[in-house]
Amino acid sequence: MNFAFSDEQQALRDQARKFLSDRAAPARVRRILESDEPFDRELWRGMGELAWTGTAIPESYGGAGFGYLELCVLAEELGRSLAPTPFSSSVYLATEALLLAGSAEQKQRWLPRLALGEAIGCLALAEGPRAPHPGNLETVARGHRLSGAKLPVADGDVADFAIVAARPEGGAAAVSLYVVPLDGAGITRTRVETVDPTRSHARLVFDAAAAEPLGEPGGGWALVERLLDRAAVLFAFEQVGGAQAALDMARDYALGRFAFGRPIGSFQAIKHKLADVYVALELARSNAYYGAWALSTDAPALPVAAAAARVAASEAFYLAAKENIQTHGGMGFTWEFDCHMYYRRAKLLALAIGSTPRWKDRLIARLEARAGA
């Protein structure tokens, strides 16, 4: 079994790294952080022109028709650069939901625009701080009308449509998904603050908003589970990229900062700190590669591989971002240094599609199910 990326995929990585080093340098990320701009629109247009937004969309719908390994390569580079765009919401979640369950008409309407980056999609699942579950969703559907509130919704303030989970009025736990254009009547969008302002979030309120069913009625939660498993692998690559960048930043500083006539990287306290990060990152990378294989082949192992990748990558990125600040010492805590931007992104991504404890529970449950099968 060969887990290495091909020469063509490595060439895509080189192209993406060069593009992002030019268009998503830390100064550009900081500009979004310190402004009211929800995302970097110029960077987003560039991604559309390079067909990144259509990487996994079939050519018949205007996409590049590459595949998920190529998308994993791009995700790692996006994570490395902290790219302030709605890529994950639109590509990992909304596009995937349409590919998995969209009708021919829904695909024809949205996928060509998503492929070009002309439309932005998002997933509206959570309804507050508690973990979303079929039994606690309060957004209800009355025919083709939705009422309820979703919070937080990543990129909900800038998206053109949302994939929304709701229960039928009077139903128990039969969750369905709906496609909701966000420019219609009965929709209120309010931007909310998060730990990482370079990734925009919103509260969406639906008041009898027009909605189209997505997939089989009552099959929404099973679709959500499939969707999250696929997205978990892609988020894991973003986290691996971010962790590698934070480790590189700490290493460079440790080799260039001197104390008592020696680089601080020569002291055991710093060496052991960075060695721990390296080990955690390599573990995360191995799990992410396994997840990439499972995702690209739609293997039965995907649920286990996705959960393992998600847990390992969340822990590695958080450790790398935290130790990067510690390696920089007192200056690492200041606004002027870029260390906090990696820490913010690590905390945000660790919660983006469910917390680490929740993914650990999913991993344990799936391993138990596999052992009992």
Image (cartoon, grey):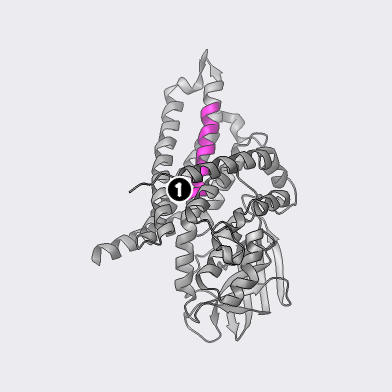
Q: Does the magenta stretch include residue 248?
A: yes
Residue that appears at 51% across and 29% down = 251
Height in image: 102 above or below 121?
A: below
Total marks in image: 1
Residue at left offset 43%, top offset 59%: 358
Q: In which quarter of the image is the C terminus?
A: bottom left
- What main secondary structure does the magenta stretch of the protein show? helix
Q: Residue 200, image x and y in percent?
A: 66, 56
- Please provide percent x and percent y for residue 61: 60, 66
Who is closer to the viewer here, 303 or 69?
A: 69
Give the residue type at disc 1.
Ala
Residue 345 spot, x, y in % from top left: 57, 47
Q: Can residue 152 be seen in this view?
A: yes
The residue stretch that appears in magenta: 237-252
| Residue drawn 45% across the image and 54% down it | 356
Location of residue 207 (image quadrant): bottom right
Q: Residue furthest left?
A: 372
Which residue does the image show at 59% across and 82% down from the upper left?
A: 141
- Label 1: element kind: helix
Is disc 1 surrounded by few (<14), some (14 to 19) or many (20+) residues within 10 Å? many
Tell me if I can see residue 322 in this picture: no
Q: In this view, does 11 lie above or below 373?
A: above
Left or right of residue 301, residue 231 in this image: right
Figure quadrant of residue 181: bottom right
**Relative height, residue 84 to residue 366 (above, below):** above
Residue nearest the viewer, comparing 105 with 231:
105
| Residue at the disc numbered 1 | 313
Q: Magenta stretch: residue 139 in it?
A: no
Q: Position of residue 153 (x, y in %)?
A: 61, 63
Residue at the top extreme of this rendering: 261
